[in-house]
Amino acid sequence: MMRRIEVKAAAAAQNPHVPVASFEHWRSLALRAYDRVAVASLLKVVASGLWYVTAPPLGMPWFQLGGLLIFLAWLASLISGWRTGTSAGLLRRQLGIALRRRAT
């Protein structure tokens, strides 16, 4: 798994064998995956909080159903982000993009 900071720090000049357009496409795909998961998690926290505060008068079955729908939407967003990140990783390997080595 690539870390966001590694993706942001990667430069096309470090991979001269990769066309710049392909490198930028990979980079935008990888960053989109991180952004999608981060935004989905933030929206889940906000939506869950608002639902918890505003929905209790609806009664138990509707309150639980709303919470379940918020959870399922969040889960779908996480899966979408995971798929995008997996596609970005596959593209990175196909293009031969090398990231900087991590300090051990």
Image (spheres, rainbow, N blue to C red):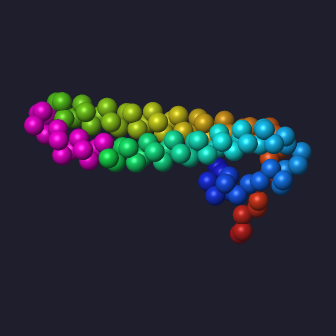
Q: Please state the extent of the stretch shown in magenta in the rendering.
A: 47-60
Where 74 falls versus 11 (above or below)? above
Where 103 falls versus 70 (above or below)? below
Residue 94, x across and y down, in percent: 80, 37
Residue in view at x 59 percent, y 41 percent: 32
Where 14 falls versus 76 (above or below)? below
**Front-lying residue, 89 or 7:** 7
Relative to residue 51, is residue 86 drawn left or right? right
Name the image quarter holding the C terminus.
bottom right
Residue 89 image-quadrant placement: top right
**Front-lying residue, 97 or 12:** 12
Residue 100, x across and y down, in percent: 76, 59
Furthest toward the bottom, the residue is 104
Residue in view at x 73 percent, y 42 percent: 24
Residue in view at x 70 percent, y 58 percent: 9
Residue 56 image-quadrant placement: top left
Q: Is residue 81 visible?
A: yes
Relative to residue 42, is residue 93 drawn left or right? right
Magenta region includes residue 53: yes
